[in-house]
Image (cartoon, rainbow, N blue to C red):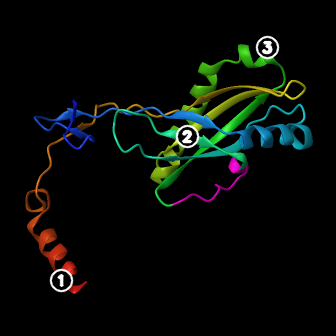
């Protein structure tokens, strides 16, 4: 449960353990993203509908009631992530550009998500934690009319057991006595 405190920021009520839930991303592609997709469609992709690597950046929302925006910008295309500002994180993804509006509308989104989830499961033990933040983008670019149709998805693995958050505890209660001593010693040396 969330409550509004007097300062206007959102806080967590810690009466008991609370079930943690994932807040979904909201896609936020900018004009540069569409411009670069159009350029790549003309110069590189042509009729090839193979997935291409794309990136988005996000910042964690400062309160739990709103989603984090996944910004897809002009520099989103390529094998390496674009540079990000301090506090920003990247989402790795794949973009599938269809060749007709009909292909876009009839694409099997469930199959695309199942494939993305399978890839995520395969990499689960071999990847850094940030590699688990993913996105999938399905597009159709009508370059004659300058219209872009899109669908963003953010696959995530569902835990077998729900995660819970316990009330905050002091360091002495949370850490073993030796760890607290080592932490104190390190702090005193610094």
Tell me the SS state at disc 3: helix
Residue pictured at 14% horizontal, 44% vertical: 167
Which of pointers 2 and 3 lies earlier in the amino acid sequence?
2
- Find out whether residue 81 is within the magenta segment: yes
Q: Is residue 141 left or right of residue 123?
A: right
Magenta-highlighted residues: 75-85
Q: Which of pointers 2 and 1 lies earlier in the amino acid sequence? A: 2
Q: Residue at x 73, y 32 (%)?
A: 96
Q: Is residue 55 above or below residue 27?
A: below
Instruction: Give the labeled residue for mark 2.
Output: 70
In the displayed structure, would residue 149 be above or below residue 69? Answer: above
Relative to 145, is 105 on the left or the right? left
Circle 3 residues within 10 Å: few <14, some 14–19, many ≥20: few
Across and down, in percent, residue 161 comes to 29, 31
Position of 73 with respect to 122 (left or right) is right
Q: Is residue 125 magenta?
A: no
Q: Magenta residues: mostly which secondary structure?
A: loop
Residue located 67% across and 56% down the image: 80
Foreground: disc 2 or disc 3: 2
Whole-percent x, y for residue 173 in the image: 8, 57
Q: Quadrant of residue 19?
A: top left
At a point 49% along the width and 51% down the height, the residue shown is: 130
From the image, tell me which residue sits under label 1.
Answer: 188
Q: Secondary structure at mark 2?
A: strand
Discs 1, 3 touching: Cβ within 8 Å? no
Badge 1 or badge 3: first in the primary sequence: 3
In the orientation shown, which residue stands out farthest toward the bottom? 189
| Secondary structure category for the residue under label 1 | helix
Identify the residue under disc 3. 102
């Amino acid at each position: 449960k969330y409550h509004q405190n007097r300062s206007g920021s959102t806080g967590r009520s810690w009466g008991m353990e609370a079930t943690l839930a994932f807040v979904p991303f909201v896609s936020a592609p900018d004009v540069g993203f569409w411009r670069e997709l159009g350029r790549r469609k003309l110069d590189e992709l042509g009729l090839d509908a193979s997935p291409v690597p794309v990136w988005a950046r996000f910042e964690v929302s400062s309160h739990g009631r709103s989603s984090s925006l996944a910004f897809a910008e002009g520099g989103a295309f390529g094998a390496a992530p674009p540079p990000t500002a301090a506090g920003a994180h990247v989402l790795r993804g794949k973009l599938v550009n269809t060749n007709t509006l009909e292909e876009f509308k009839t694409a099997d989104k469930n199959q695309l998500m199942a494939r993305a989830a399978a890839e995520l499961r395969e990499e689960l033990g071999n990847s850094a934690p940030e590699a688990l933040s993913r996105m999938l983008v399905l597009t159709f670019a009508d370059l004659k009319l300058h219209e872009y149709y899109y669908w963003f998805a953010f696959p995530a693995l569902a835990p077998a057991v729900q995660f819970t958050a316990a009330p905050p505890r002091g360091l002495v209660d949370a850490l073993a006595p030796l760890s607290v001593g080592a932490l104190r010693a390190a702090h005193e040396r610094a």
